[in-house]
Image (cartoon, helix red, strand yellow):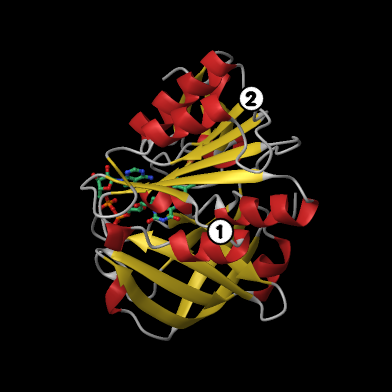
Amino acid sequence: MAQLVNEHAQMLSNEQVGPRLHLMVLEAPEIAGAILPGQFVHMKLPDLEAHILRRPFSVYARDKAAGTIDILYQEVGSVTKLMPGMQGGTVEVIGPVGNTWNAECAHALLVGGGVGSAPLFMLAEALKEAGTPFDVVLGAQTRDALVARSRYADLMQCEPCCATDDGSFGRAGFCTSLAEERLAQGCIADGAAYDFLAVCGPEPLMRIVAKMGADAGVRTQVSMEKRMACGVGACLSCVVDTVDGKRRSCVDGPIFEAEKVVW
Ligand SMILES: Cc1cc2nc3c(=O)[nH]c(=O)nc-3n(C[C@H](O)[C@H](O)[C@H](O)COP(=O)(O)OP(=O)(O)OC[C@H]3O[C@@H](n4cnc5c(N)ncnc54)[C@H](O)[C@@H]3O)c2cc1C
Ligand code: FES
């Protein structure tokens, strides 16, 4: 893994892309050059002295040549609700933090719920580059919230399988039913059974899909987005219970073998 760096990144843009969803582009050439799929950055925003703790965000995409990283974020609380008001300026980002997906496989299925679609995109790029067939299932509350769909479609040259809670796009309901269907039918390209499942999203989604993977005998990894404080393994605020004991999501994760997680 690359060494952690603390970059003072220029904010190049910060635009709303969906309901409470925003895309921030940062100039962070060292992190852009080193980051691996599934890793994240720990971000400290300027003028937010009341919020001394950094906030973790996955890197959605990076452009090595331009030295930029994209962050897809959702407004949920005190810091993320202030972030949309920021334009330009410098953001302090520590990265790359955490481990990467272990995607050695012949056929992969990627399942992303909500902003959980972000940490899977660089994995999709890596699978494409390796020539590994893969399919993508995305879920969101509404059509407008399916903000990663077009990026996946451009990469894959076909539509990902989509579900919306309100039925405004794709299958109506949770994307778990699409994941179950795909696991039963196999890879869209050649019908072969998947031998790797990668999941990111709300914990109930990951728990359900992890069980599907276990029942189907498919190796499954999940990205555990626990609340984090220090981000360097010191405070134990991000602990995940596993069959091997407690593990820190920031340094031992965020990606875990689903069969090891005690849900
Ligand atoms: C490894 C990792 C990668 C992440 N990647 C992304 C990403 O790409 N895009 C994105 O939008 N968010 C991502 N998150 C979640 C993001 O860090 C939180 O939404 C953010 O820290 C909330 O800060 P806040 O000050 O706005 O919320 P707070 O005011 O601190 O909390 C508001 C609410 O959000 C909940 N919350 C806070 N942190 C988390 C969390 N980690 N998981 C679930 N609920 C949380 C709290 O319980 C509370 O209900 C990631 C988290 C981790 C650990
Ligand atoms: S955030 Fe402090 S140990 Fe993980």
What number is the disc on residue 22?
A: none
Q: Nearer the viewer, residue 34 or 189?
A: 189
Q: Mark 1 — residue? A: 158
Q: On the rendered structure, is 139 left or right of 101?
A: left
Image x and y of residue 194, in percent: 64, 30
Q: Nearer the viewer, residue 129 or 63?
A: 129
- SS class of the residue under badge 2? loop
What number is the disc on residue 219?
A: 2
Regarding residue 234, the answer to whether it shows in the image is no
Regarding residue 36, the answer to whether it shows in the image is yes
- State the residue lying farthest toward the left: 166
At 65% from the left and 41% from the top, the residue drawn is: 101
Q: Tell me the distance, in whole angstroms, between the alpha carbons under discs 1 and 2.
A: 25 Å
- How packed mark 1 is, by other alpha carbons closer than 10 Å (few <14, some 14-19, many 20 or more), is few
User: Which is closer to the viewer, label 1 or label 2?
Assistant: 1
Q: On the rendered structure, is 135 left or right of 12?
A: right
Q: Please say if 201 is above or below 261.
A: below
- SS class of the residue under badge 1? loop
Image x and y of residue 202, in percent: 36, 39
In terms of sequence position, does the residue under pointer 1 or pointer 2 come before the other?
A: 1
Q: Amino acid at mark 1?
A: Cys
Q: Please say if 7 is above or below 58.
A: below
Q: Please say if 30 is above or below 180.
A: below
